[in-house]
Image (cartoon, rainbow, N blue to C red):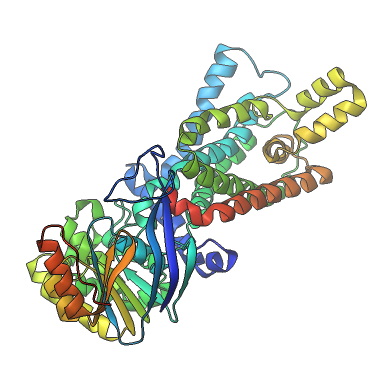
Amino acid sequence: MNSSWPHLLERRELLVELVWSDLRAQVVRRRLGALWWVADPLLMMVVYWGVVVGLLGRGKTAYAPYPVYLLCALVTWKHLAKAAQRATGILRQRESLIRSVPFPTAVLPVAEAASGLVLSLGGYLVVAVASLLFPSPHHGGSLLPWVQVPLLLAFQLVAVTGICLLLACAGTLARDLEAVTSHLIRIGFYVSPGLFGLDLVRDELFTRLGPEAGAAALFGYLLNPFAILFTGYRDAFFYGRFLPLEHWLLLAGSSLGLLAVGYGVYRRHDDELVKRL
Amino acid sequence: MELRGLSVWYPLRNHRARRREFLGYDHPGILWALRDLTLDLYEGTTLAIVGGNGAGKSTLCLVLAGILRPDRGAVRIRGHVSTLFGLGQGFNRDLSGRENIRLYAALLGIRRQMIRERMDEIIEFTELGDFIDEPVSHYSAGMRARLAFSVAMVLESDVLLLDEVLSVGDAGFQAKSKARLRERMSRSRLIAVVSHQLPLLRDVATHALWLEKGQAHAFGPASEVLDAYERAAGATRRPVRRIA
């Protein structure tokens, strides 16, 4: 059964069941169960606080409190990293299932993206509470910018789904990709404004390239939807302000573009994928 | 069901492999698992598909199920197709039997509402008792097969495909599963069965297709084709009289 839109819509109950099963299995597998959805990002924040602020003495000025600043990006990146890594090998792992039951196989990487997002909600909860308990001196004072978060989550899901579809297809056709994916994702994190802010990138580009070339380079940089997602979550939680409209438009374009490319590539190789397992 | 020039190839991983008698191929990078298969099957037919290992039986089932698309030729099937092979694939081992009923049903395309209505009936048929709420990782292979079979029997279809599933479970459950399967088969308009169990095939099939190296070696009334297949399988290499 191919993964055309009619088939995917027809089997939407399967997508819900796959996401639910994955979440339920994550809870059942561990003694603390669903508590890990909050404990894991909390531990991440504590570790970075200890290492970056305590040991390295960084993040005490422009981005203070730095762990909260960093967590806004880390939670998002962790969603992408985990979903992408799992999606790369998902079709091979489920080979027996795919060769036994006819269903649109694209639901498998889509389910990875969706269940990953649900799991990351605990992380955003930690970010929200931490931003209240340890407010940044740069915070505007209003919580109204939090209304941006659902839309940011929606675009995040769209972008990650596109990447998961692309990697699921590529990972089946190119066997070694699974070993390389985690490194590629790590490189992507360091290139994106995860450890630092967009303001630093802007200043650097304008200084090195001048105003016009710098603006063009910045535009190219912002085609990475995660550059805007990190900035968006920071604007909402850390700075208490709204993301500019042009960033929303870029985010919509780039994330929908990723989905279109990912789905297009998957559909193009849909029939071949079963044979390559 | 109409098959017209149905052909399917698989990519060979070792594309430097030379031509061999058992698996013939004429392109260095691919293997033709099915080649120019043409067949017409009508309502009321129960087709037994037989052949040696690598003959193309499972590939034919995959194509009929819609899991694989033919590379050449066409398949036309009127009606809804359901499959009974690889029972239990897709179970999540961390979840209970009850939770896996929902998951497996969703994989098979059974609506959530239907499963909700028939959950008690399915659980009763499995005879798993309190184990139904235990993780499937604690189940034996027979218990998993019971669970999967019980869910699969809910699915109604016009065309039923079976691959080595004519009964499941331990001796006690086999009679029950066989009876249920016969009942299910009686409600299907067309059935295709892959099995090495010739006595069972003689019992249920009206027609038989004997595949050799991806091509139709013989097709016709089940008794004749299965007799010929049995003689050939038991004999040394010698030419076999074509039935059709």
Residue A255, x across and y down, in percent: 69, 47
The answer to which of B77 and A2 lies nearer the viewer is B77
The answer to which of A249 and B193 lies nearer the viewer is B193
Q: Is residue B74 left or right of residue B196?
A: right
Residue A248, x across and y down, in percent: 77, 46
Residue B59, x across and y down, in percent: 35, 61
Q: Residue furthest top?
A: A56
Using the image, determine if residue A67 lies above or below residue B27.
Answer: above
The answer to which of B64 and A67 lies nearer the viewer is B64
Q: Residue B138: in sight, yes or no?
A: yes
Q: Residue B179: in sight, yes or no?
A: no
Residue shown at 82%/29% (left/top)?
A217
Using the image, determine if residue A155 lies above or below residue A223.
Answer: below
Residue shown at 44%/42% (left/top)?
A89
Residue shown at 75%/48% (left/top)?
A253
Residue B82, x across and y down, in percent: 36, 73
Q: Residue furthest left?
A: B171
Splitting the image into 4 quarters, where does residue B146 fall?
bottom left
Residue shown at 47%/51% (left/top)?
A273
The answer to which of A176 and A228 lies nearer the viewer is A176
How many numbered marks have been drawn onto this rendered protein structure? 0
Splitting the image into 4 quarters, where does residue B14 fall?
top left
